[in-house]
């Protein structure tokens, strides 16, 4: 019974991720959702800045601290290991929901592109970024990243098998295609409001810090394999031609 409950819990957390992620695309791109980054301001600028900074900090701390090896070791004293990843995903979703609900638009326009063809190109670039994000999760094991693989092993009564170290397609060109896709989606907008700029800038800063933490963990885990991979493949800006390696690491 416990195995079934853990598996159902994992499915619920995964479905909540799908819903939250889909809403996030609309929230950032201002399409088909009731709240967005760029709506009309409702509160004074400084109040909005403080609220939004708090929301971004909450997500960054939750997302980074809970992904660290030391925290996981402590956390799994209280949360069963098979559902640790699912719980991480669920809490990340809740932080995003808080952002959707409490985010305060800030007014002001940094740039606005009026040309219809240019707008179409930029929207296409943002869509490309989201597609890269989605595909990248499958290249590194989508279901492990979001906790379903862990609860599936537990349901079957099998020990969890860590992911193998390999170089799926995008990872031959850039070490962090997931982050490359996010940055493309965040910055590719025909109208950059102050709120959107602060969001994109904060996320860029978070990603650059997160990469350092992740690569430290990956180097400790995979040793010389990851060190050699770092020498051959750029971090975020893809090379036209990959230098090739047979191995790459999964995102934390």
Image (tube, rainbow, N blue to C red):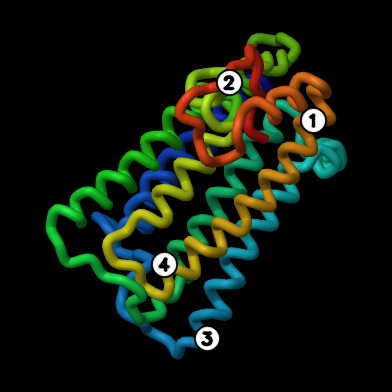
Which residue is under mark 4? 196
The image position of residue 92, as x and y in percent, is 59, 49
Specify the quadrant of the image occupied by residue 191: bottom left
In this rendering, the label closer to the viewer, 4 or 1? 1
Of 90 and 44, the residue lying toward us: 44
Residue lying at 71% horizontally and 13% vertically, measured from the top left = 161
Mark toward the start of the polypeptide (3 vs 4): 3
Local SS, label 1 = helix
Separation of residues labelled 2 and 4 (CA atoms): 36 Å
Mark toward the start of the polypeptide (2 vs 4): 4
Mark toward the start of the polypeptide (1 vs 3): 3
The image position of residue 74, as x and y in percent, is 86, 42
Which numbered circle lies on residue 219? 1
Local SS, label 4 = helix
Local SS, label 3 = helix
Mark toward the start of the polypeptide (4 vs 1): 4
Which quarter of the figure is the N terminus placed in?
top right
- In the picture shown, does residue 203 fall above or below 245? below
Image marks 2 and 4: residues in contact by CB distance under 8 Å: no
């Amino acid at each position: 019974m416990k195995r079934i409950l853990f598996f159902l819990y994992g499915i619920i957390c995964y479905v909540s991720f799908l819903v939250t992620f889909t809403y996030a695309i609309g929230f950032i791109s201002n399409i088909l959702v009731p709240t967005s980054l760029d709506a009309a301001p409702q509160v004074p600028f400084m109040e909005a800045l403080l609220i939004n900074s708090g929301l971004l900090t909450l997500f960054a701390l939750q997302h980074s601290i809970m992904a660290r090896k030391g925290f996981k070791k402590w956390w799994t004293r209280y949360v069963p290991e098979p559902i640790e990843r699912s719980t991480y995903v669920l809490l990340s979703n809740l932080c995003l929901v808080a952002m959707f609900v409490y985010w305060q638009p800030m007014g002001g326009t940094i740039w606005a592109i009026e040309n219809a063809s240019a707008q179409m190109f930029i929207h296409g670039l943002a869509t490309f970024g989201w597609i890269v994000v989605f595909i990248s999760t499958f290249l590194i094991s989508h279901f492990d990243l979001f906790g379903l693989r862990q609860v599936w092993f537990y349901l079957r009564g099998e020990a969890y098998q860590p992911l193998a170290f390999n170089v799926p397609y995008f990872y031959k060109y850039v070490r962090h295609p997931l982050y490359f896709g996010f940055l493309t989606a965040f910055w590719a907008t025909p109208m950059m409001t102050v709120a959107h700029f602060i969001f994109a800038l904060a996320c860029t800063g978070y990603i650059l810090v997160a990469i350092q933490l992740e690569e430290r963990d990956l180097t400790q885990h995979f040793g010389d394999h990851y060190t050699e991979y770092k020498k051959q493949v750029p971090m975020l800006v893809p090379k036209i031609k990959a230098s090739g390696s047979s191995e790459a690491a999964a995102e934390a």
